[in-house]
Image (cartoon, rainbow, N blue to C red):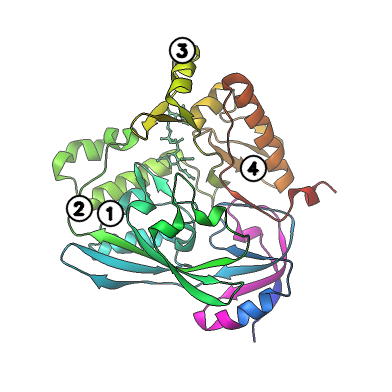
Amino acid sequence: MLHITEQDLTHHNTLGLKSQARAFLRLESLDMLDALSDVAARYPGVVVLGGGSNVVLASQIDELVIHVETRGADLVDQDPDAVIVEVQAGEPWHHFVASCMEQGWNGLENLALIPGSAGAAPIQNIGAYGVEQNQYFHSLVAWDIRHGRRVEMGPADCLFAYRDSFFKHAEAGRWLILAVRYRLPRAWRAQVSYPDLARHAGIAMAGAAVAPRQVFDAVCEIRRAKLPDPAELANVGSFFKNPLVSAKAYRELRGLHPGIVGYPVEEGKRYKLAAGWMIERCGWKGRRLGSVGMHERQSLVLVNHGGATARDIQVLADVVRAEVATRFGVHLEQEPVEIGTAASEQA
Ligand code: EPU
């Protein structure tokens, strides 16, 4: 028997939106999966919630909300070159990164302090400071809720791209990620070329002798200085993706806006523009619109100063998007996933 209840989700989303789930299920053990597939069919849909750090929740959710609470990480395989570590989906990502480092399983340091659960990491293909999780991704185990079966997926199945994967485009509510495996090479090489990291005093001083813990500490320090802690100021990290434009479009933009920040990708065929720079130029850094605003130190981060609804978030996002489009001719794509309909907020 599965225990399904109503649940206030206000503390289950880092944007701090007031939201009520009609049906909420804590997934504490994989023994619950068979029963889950039977029960799920009775609801208008299924929503999987991890740390709630990349979602915009409507005030009422009619779908069955599954909160993944499985924890832990283990070494599942090793060879002379690498270890393979499997993390359960409900494990907080940062906790996983820190415990890998304690064990001497290195590689994920640049991804320290990213909020959310490990199961969510492949969905948006989390990345920071020059590393994306797909660089170390080995495979994952998912539950196909519709067909009630366990499926293993490799990198080719997951279609990873910048803040994107198969799961962002798959049938809503079908896939439940149960565990993720990372292949961490024994030969570690620091990846510290990202400007903020290269400039960091601890990294610059250590030079070639830099150790994984120093990278981990530096990333934590940079993030703490720049990005608001959701426990203090509600947010979901970057609210928009950094848009990709052609090299030609980038050159034209540079002509018009000489300071524009962009990085070459795909061997210089395209450029990734810093959306935060454009938002700042539009005057939105630290500016508010009612209860919401763009953060004062990182304008790519939308913050809830208290009492906002999904509708308030959408109004601000639309204004920012429109101003950036008018000034730079660039379309900003939203990063967090919307759950429930923001339209229900209007009433
Ligand atoms: N910038 C500004 N003003 C701003 C923000 C940024 O001018 O308000 C410019 C600066 O020139 C800065 C450059 O943009 O040097 C890049 O800024 P930053 O290093 O903060 O990175 P980002 O491109 O804004 C991305 C990720 C972050 C990740 C950082 C570091 C996306 C959507 N965001 O931000 O990810 O932590 O790089 O790697 O790719 C997240 O996804 O939630 C997130 C925080």
Q: Measure the C-alpha gap from mark 2 to mark 3.
A: 41 Å
First in sequence, mark 2 or 3: give its number: 2
The residue carrying mark 4 has its beta carbon less than 8 Å from ligand 1 = no
Q: Are marks 3 and 1 in contact (CB under 8 Å)?
A: no
User: What residue sits right under mark 1 in the picture?
Assistant: 107
Label 2 CB, ligand 1: below 8 Å? no
In which quadrant of this rendering is ligand 1 seen? top left
Q: Kindly state the secondary structure of the residue where label 2 is placed.
A: loop
Total count of labels: 4
The first of marks 3 and 1 along the sequence is 1
The answer to whether the residues at label 2 and label 1 have Cβ atoms under 8 Å apart is yes
Q: Is residue 165 visible?
A: yes
Residue mark closest to the camera, 3 vs 1: 3
Q: Amino acid at mark 2?
A: Trp
- CA–CA distance in space, label 3 to label 4: 37 Å
Locate residue 20, reporting x and y percent: 73, 62
Location of residue 286 in the rendering, given as x and y in whole percent from the top left corner = 57, 31
Which label number is shown at residue 188?
2
Residue 255 is tagged as 3
Q: Residues within 10 Å of mark 4 (few under 14, many from 20)?
A: some
- Element carrying mark 4: loop
6 or 45, which lies in front?
Answer: 45
Going from N to C along the chain, the mark reached first, 1 or 4, is 1
Distance from disc 4 to disc 2, alpha carbons, whole Å, reads: 41 Å
Q: Which residue is mark 4?
A: 305
